[in-house]
Amino acid sequence: MPHRTAVIGLGSMGYGIAQSALRAGHETYGFDVNEDRCRAFLAEGGRPGALPEVAEYLDAVIVVVLNAAQTEEVLFGPAGIVPALKPGAVVLSCATVPPDVARDLARRTSDHGVHYLDAPISGGAVKAAAGELTIMAAGSAEAFSAARATLDAISETVFELGEAGAGSAMKAVNQLLAGVHIASMAEALTFGMTQGVAPETFVEVISKCAGTSWMLENRAPHIVAGDYTPHSAVNIWLKDLGIVLDIAKTGQFSAPLTAVALQQFVAAAGQGLGGEDDAAVAKVYARNAGLALPGEA
């Protein structure tokens, strides 16, 4: 049955999620602080209406904001949506947050008779728009049942990982690898340049060799094209790798590769690159080595 669904946060991932829900036949509302994004989604067939006016009719709310603080604000802030939802509705919380935060939000949401699915996402903007995300989901059986039609609309693979918090723990593992892989790709590409290996040759060869990774194959072409339009910005990694290290510190676990990768993203942000595509971390290496990347003089 079609759901009444709201997507809160129409960034590169959230917009694609909203498109996928709409394409699957759900009555879909899109909300964002950027009114241009809201108007664009309305033009594609999104439902009109203010969030306070439609909240009580919603079956599912997909929250695709930046971090834990924004998720908290959307759910329980002065205009928080959870108290306005009908009993039995479900919240899918997609931001990368610490597992303890996910557990707390799940408990508080349940206090209002609303289900909570700890549902971090992976796959990038392209898969979000195609309805082919991977979702690392965790929550009660009732939450999964309430969210099933929505999950089917926006994802290709859903891992059911247990109770709330388990999805966020798995997302932290994924982000550790993804952030390290981007930084190592940038280091390897620029190291190759010092040895006369052109970036386009690097991509052609290494993508067919054992040293490749999904992030290498996805991000290195951005460097070759000299295009740093932010599909996933440098600043995301300050947050996500910071979460990984916070979790590691709490568990007294040493994560030196994560710490080194984070410092490279911090350096990139310090050079004014925080809003650029995360492949721009290569510019840190290039500047240190006196190299000119494609598209640079």
Image: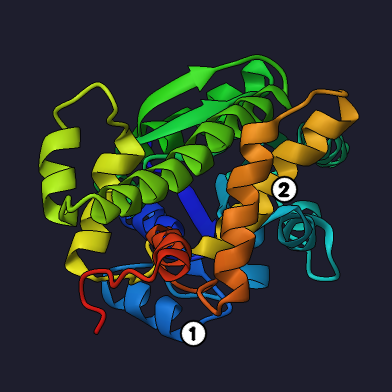
Instruction: Say which residue appears at 10% left-offset and 42% top-offset.
Output: 204
Viewer-side residue, 232 vs 19: 232
Q: What element carries label 2?
A: helix
Query: Could you say which is closer to the camera, residue 197 or residue 5?
Result: 197
Report how many numbered discs are placed on residues in the image. 2
Q: Which quarter shows the N terminus?
A: top left
Residue 160: which numbered mark, if any?
Answer: none
Mark 1 Cα-neighbour bin, 10 Å: few <14, some 14–19, many ≥20: few
- On screen, residue 67 versus residue 236, left or right, reads right
Query: Can residue 106 be seen by looking at this rendering?
Result: no
Quarter occupied by the C terminus: bottom left
Q: Which amino acid does label 1 sit on?
A: Glu
Q: Which of pointers 2 and 1 indicates the residue nearer the eye?
A: 2
Disc 2: which residue: 242
78 is higher (above) or lower (below) than 238: below
Using the image, determine if residue 15 lies above or below residue 258: below
Q: Residue at x 57, y 58 (%)?
A: 265
Which circle marks residue 35 in the picture?
Answer: 1
Q: How is the image coloured?
A: rainbow
**Does 44 sit left or right of 149 as displayed?**
left
Q: Note whether 201 is above or below 273 in the view shown.
A: above
Identified by mark 2, the residue type is Gly
Q: Is mark 1 on a helix, strand or loop?
A: helix
Q: Position of residue 88 (x, y in %)?
A: 68, 35
